[in-house]
Amino acid sequence: MNRFDTLDGDTAVCTASFQATHRRKADDTLWTLGGAYRSDLTRTAAGRRISGMALTAVWSDGTR
């Protein structure tokens, strides 16, 4: 079963939250970023394919 935030004919939108922590080797500092991905999908003969993607950062912590 597929779950989409919106589904309209041959197009769909799916969103996912994320949290990513990055470590800089030079000084071992951390930077954590959180937010959401939005994936725009289009149905093709071969199945659904990503037609667009956006990352929206909502928060961060640490040393960028």
Image: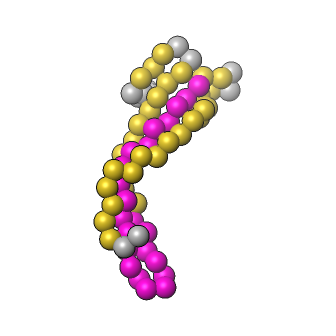
Residue pictured at 46% horizontal, 29% vertical? 13
What coloring was used for the rendering?
A: secondary structure
The reply to whether the magenta stretch includes residue 37 is: yes
Residue pictured at 45% horizontal, 38% vertical? 38
Check the image and report above or below for 11 versus 18: above
Check the image and report above or below for 39 versus 25: above
Quadrant position of the C terminus in the picture: bottom left
Residue 31 location, quadrant: bottom left
Residue pictured at 68% horizontal, 21% vertical? 45
Residue farthest toward the bottom in the current orientation of the protein: 27
Percent of width and height locating residue 43: 60, 22
Percent of width and height locating residue 61: 31, 65
Viewer-proximal residue among 64 and 44: 64
What kind of secondary structure does the magenta stretch mostly adopt? Answer: strand
Tell me where the magenta segment starts and ends, as one range: 21-42
Quadrant position of the N terminus in the picture: top left
Check the image and report above or below for 54 versus 26: above
Residue farthest toward the top in the current orientation of the protein: 9
Q: In the image, 63: left or right of 50?
A: left
Q: Is residue 16 visible?
A: yes
Residue pictured at 33% horizontal, 50% vertical? 58
Viewer-proximal residue among 48 and 52: 52
Percent of width and height locating residue 37: 44, 43
Residue farthest toward the front in the current orientation of the protein: 64
Viewer-proximal residue among 64 and 49: 64
Q: Is residue 18 visible?
A: no
